[in-house]
Image (cartoon, rainbow, N blue to C red):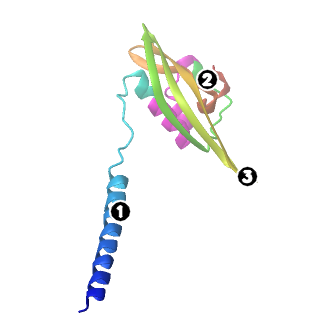
Amino acid sequence: MTEQSGRSRAVMIALISGIALVVVIALIAVFARSSPTQYDADTPEGVVQRYSQAVVDGDYDAAVGYLVPERADSCVNRRIEVVDVRVTLLDTTVRGDLATVEVGIAASYGGGPFGSSTYEYEDQFLLQEVEGEWLVVEAPWELAVCEEVYG
Protein backbone atom coordinates (compact mmCIF):
# COMPACT_ATOMS: atom_id res chain seq x y z
CA MET A 1 0.00 0.00 0.00
CA THR A 2 1.38 3.40 -0.93
CA GLU A 3 1.55 6.39 1.32
CA GLN A 4 -1.08 8.19 -0.82
CA SER A 5 -3.63 5.37 -0.54
CA GLY A 6 -2.99 5.15 3.22
CA ARG A 7 -3.83 8.84 3.61
CA SER A 8 -6.94 8.48 1.44
CA ARG A 9 -8.07 5.57 3.59
CA ALA A 10 -7.48 7.59 6.80
CA VAL A 11 -9.46 10.54 5.41
CA MET A 12 -12.29 8.21 4.39
CA ILE A 13 -12.40 6.59 7.85
CA ALA A 14 -12.41 10.01 9.52
CA LEU A 15 -15.22 11.20 7.24
CA ILE A 16 -17.36 8.11 7.87
CA SER A 17 -16.72 8.37 11.63
CA GLY A 18 -17.80 12.02 11.58
CA ILE A 19 -21.02 11.21 9.74
CA ALA A 20 -21.76 8.34 12.13
CA LEU A 21 -21.20 10.67 15.10
CA VAL A 22 -23.64 13.25 13.68
CA VAL A 23 -26.26 10.52 13.11
CA VAL A 24 -25.86 9.23 16.68
CA ILE A 25 -26.20 12.75 18.13
CA ALA A 26 -29.31 13.39 16.01
CA LEU A 27 -30.90 10.13 17.20
CA ILE A 28 -30.14 10.98 20.83
CA ALA A 29 -31.73 14.42 20.38
CA VAL A 30 -34.88 12.92 18.84
CA PHE A 31 -35.36 10.23 21.47
CA ALA A 32 -34.39 12.41 24.43
CA ARG A 33 -37.27 14.83 23.86
CA SER A 34 -39.52 14.74 26.85
CA SER A 35 -43.27 14.58 26.60
CA PRO A 36 -45.29 17.45 28.08
CA THR A 37 -45.64 17.52 31.84
CA GLN A 38 -48.93 15.98 32.96
CA TYR A 39 -50.42 18.17 35.68
CA ASP A 40 -52.55 16.70 38.44
CA ALA A 41 -56.20 16.56 37.34
CA ASP A 42 -57.25 18.09 40.67
CA THR A 43 -55.37 21.35 40.02
CA PRO A 44 -56.35 24.37 37.91
CA GLU A 45 -53.38 23.63 35.62
CA GLY A 46 -54.48 20.02 35.17
CA VAL A 47 -58.05 21.03 34.33
CA VAL A 48 -56.84 23.59 31.78
CA GLN A 49 -54.52 20.99 30.27
CA ARG A 50 -57.26 18.37 29.93
CA TYR A 51 -59.88 20.86 28.72
CA SER A 52 -57.46 22.23 26.10
CA GLN A 53 -56.55 18.72 24.95
CA ALA A 54 -60.23 17.84 24.58
CA VAL A 55 -60.79 20.95 22.45
CA VAL A 56 -57.73 20.24 20.30
CA ASP A 57 -58.89 16.63 19.87
CA GLY A 58 -62.37 17.84 18.86
CA ASP A 59 -63.98 16.02 21.80
CA TYR A 60 -66.87 18.38 22.55
CA ASP A 61 -68.44 16.24 25.28
CA ALA A 62 -65.18 15.91 27.21
CA ALA A 63 -64.51 19.65 26.93
CA VAL A 64 -68.00 20.57 28.16
CA GLY A 65 -67.44 18.23 31.13
CA TYR A 66 -64.77 20.65 32.39
CA LEU A 67 -67.13 23.65 32.40
CA VAL A 68 -68.98 25.02 35.42
CA PRO A 69 -72.58 23.70 35.33
CA GLU A 70 -74.19 27.02 34.36
CA ARG A 71 -71.85 27.35 31.35
CA ALA A 72 -72.24 23.71 30.33
CA ASP A 73 -76.05 23.91 30.54
CA SER A 74 -76.25 27.05 28.41
CA CYS A 75 -73.67 25.92 25.84
CA VAL A 76 -75.78 25.79 22.68
CA ASN A 77 -73.50 27.16 19.96
CA ARG A 78 -71.08 24.29 19.74
CA ARG A 79 -67.83 25.26 18.14
CA ILE A 80 -64.71 23.20 17.80
CA GLU A 81 -62.85 24.10 14.66
CA VAL A 82 -59.26 24.43 15.81
CA VAL A 83 -56.72 23.35 13.23
CA ASP A 84 -53.36 23.43 15.02
CA VAL A 85 -52.98 24.94 18.49
CA ARG A 86 -50.20 24.74 21.05
CA VAL A 87 -50.94 25.84 24.62
CA THR A 88 -48.15 26.65 27.09
CA LEU A 89 -48.66 27.23 30.81
CA LEU A 90 -47.29 30.61 31.91
CA ASP A 91 -48.62 31.24 35.42
CA THR A 92 -51.34 30.27 37.87
CA THR A 93 -52.90 32.41 40.58
CA VAL A 94 -55.33 30.91 43.10
CA ARG A 95 -57.43 33.17 45.33
CA GLY A 96 -59.90 31.21 47.42
CA ASP A 97 -62.26 29.34 45.11
CA LEU A 98 -61.14 31.21 41.96
CA ALA A 99 -58.07 30.57 39.85
CA THR A 100 -56.56 32.33 36.87
CA VAL A 101 -54.35 30.23 34.60
CA GLU A 102 -52.32 32.31 32.17
CA VAL A 103 -51.33 30.56 28.96
CA GLY A 104 -49.46 31.22 25.76
CA ILE A 105 -51.33 30.14 22.65
CA ALA A 106 -49.81 29.52 19.24
CA ALA A 107 -52.35 28.83 16.49
CA SER A 108 -51.88 27.91 12.84
CA TYR A 109 -54.53 27.90 10.17
CA GLY A 110 -54.52 26.35 6.70
CA GLY A 111 -52.56 27.63 3.80
CA GLY A 112 -53.25 30.40 1.41
CA PRO A 113 -51.15 31.64 -1.46
CA PHE A 114 -48.37 32.46 1.00
CA GLY A 115 -48.58 29.37 3.21
CA SER A 116 -50.16 28.88 6.59
CA SER A 117 -51.08 31.70 8.93
CA THR A 118 -49.59 31.42 12.41
CA TYR A 119 -49.94 33.76 15.35
CA GLU A 120 -49.14 33.71 19.07
CA TYR A 121 -50.70 35.52 21.98
CA GLU A 122 -51.18 35.29 25.74
CA ASP A 123 -54.57 34.85 27.36
CA GLN A 124 -56.07 33.31 30.46
CA PHE A 125 -58.57 30.81 31.77
CA LEU A 126 -60.79 31.61 34.72
CA LEU A 127 -61.65 28.61 36.89
CA GLN A 128 -63.89 28.17 39.90
CA GLU A 129 -63.73 25.46 42.53
CA VAL A 130 -67.16 23.83 42.75
CA GLU A 131 -67.63 21.12 45.40
CA GLY A 132 -63.88 20.47 45.52
CA GLU A 133 -63.45 20.31 41.74
CA TRP A 134 -61.86 22.98 39.54
CA LEU A 135 -64.03 23.87 36.53
CA VAL A 136 -63.65 26.32 33.64
CA VAL A 137 -65.72 29.51 33.79
CA GLU A 138 -64.04 31.34 30.91
CA ALA A 139 -61.56 30.26 28.25
CA PRO A 140 -59.59 32.07 25.54
CA TRP A 141 -61.69 32.44 22.38
CA GLU A 142 -59.38 30.08 20.52
CA LEU A 143 -60.31 27.28 22.93
CA ALA A 144 -63.92 28.17 23.74
CA VAL A 145 -66.25 25.28 22.88
CA CYS A 146 -69.22 27.64 22.76
CA GLU A 147 -69.86 31.37 22.82
CA GLU A 148 -70.93 31.31 26.47
CA VAL A 149 -67.43 30.25 27.55
CA TYR A 150 -65.48 33.02 25.82
CA GLY A 151 -64.78 35.69 28.43
**Camera sees residue 101:** yes
Prevailing SS of the magenta stretch: helix
Question: Where does label 3 land, which residue?
Answer: 114
Disc nearer the start of the sequence (1/2): 1
**Residue 90, above or below 4:** above
Q: Quadrant of the C terminus?
A: top right
Question: Where does label 1 land, which residue?
Answer: 22
**Residue 130, above or below 53:** above
Question: Where does label 2 land, which residue?
Answer: 149
- Residue at far left of view: 1
- Residue at far top of view: 96
- Whole-Å distance between the Cαs marked 1 and 2? 49 Å
Instruction: Identify which amino acid the numbered label 1 is placed on.
Output: Val
Secondary element under disc 1, as helix, strand or loop, is helix
Disc nearer the start of the sequence (3/2): 3
- Residue at far front of view: 3
Q: Quadrant of residue 80?
A: top right
